[in-house]
Amino acid sequence: MPYPMQRKDRETSRDETLAILDRSSWGVLTSVNNDGSPYGIPLSLARDGDCLYFHCALKGQKLKNLRSRPEVCIVFVGSAEVPINRFTVFYESAVVFGTAEEVTSREEKIQGLRIISERFTPENMHAFNGEIEQMLDITGLWKIHINGITGKRRKP
């Protein structure tokens, strides 16, 4: 769970933090390998309420980790700008602490994939049903339950 933020003056509200998350093209999911070492991988995630969805293959290191230790952390960077002639960075970021769960229900799997597709490829939704027919059985879907979230921003 989140630790108290050092720079309270840069902390964003929950709504602002969710907006940062929703604007981010991707987040880096961090999980733990069986040997205790960290494993991080960028993902394109879409939010529905207090859950984040991502699609994936049916096998892989990420899934091994999530099945044995479902607790995760995901970092999102909404923006970052290095101003000329200054020693600073203007940024906005969000950190999610959550629990991963594999989606196995056909109905929820289709709905989660729809949420992802509407976020990242809204212009292709006319082909969604055909793609689902072809790919549903060979596509994995996971959701992350948001247990805690923090956001931070440094403005110009």
Image (cartoon, rainbow, N blue to C red):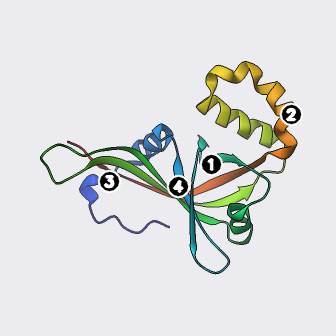
Amino acid type, mark 4: Val
Q: Secondary structure at mark 4?
A: strand
> Where is residue 130 shown, x and y percent of the image?
83, 25
* Marks 4,2: beta carbons within 8 A: no
* Disc on res. 11: 3
Residue 149 falls left or right of residue 153: right
Which residue is disc 2 drawn over?
A: 134
Mark 3 or 4: in front is 4
* SS of the residue under disc 1: strand
Disc 2 marks a residue whose amino acid type is Gln
Q: Is residue 91 left or right of residue 88?
A: right
> Which comes before the other along the chain, label 3 or label 2?
3
Residue type, label 1: Cys
Name the element at disc 2. helix
Instruction: Tell whether label 2 touches label 1 (CB within 8 Å).
Output: no
Q: Which residue is mark 4?
A: 28
The location of residue 1, given as percent across then percent down, is 50, 67
Which of pointers 1 and 4 indicates the residue nearer the eye? 4
Q: Is residue 107 above or below residue 30?
A: above
Q: Position of residue 74 (x, y in %)?
A: 53, 57
Query: Badge 3: few (under 14), some or many (20 or more) residues near its Cα, within 10 Å?
Result: some
Distance between mark 1 and mark 4 Cα atoms? 16 Å
Residue type marked 3: Glu
Gap in angstroms between the C-alphas marked 3 and 4: 20 Å
Residue at 67 percent of width and 59 percent of height: 100
Q: CA distance from mark 3 to mark 2?
A: 44 Å
Q: Which residue is tagged 1?
A: 51
Residue occupying image coordinates x 70% and y 64%: 61
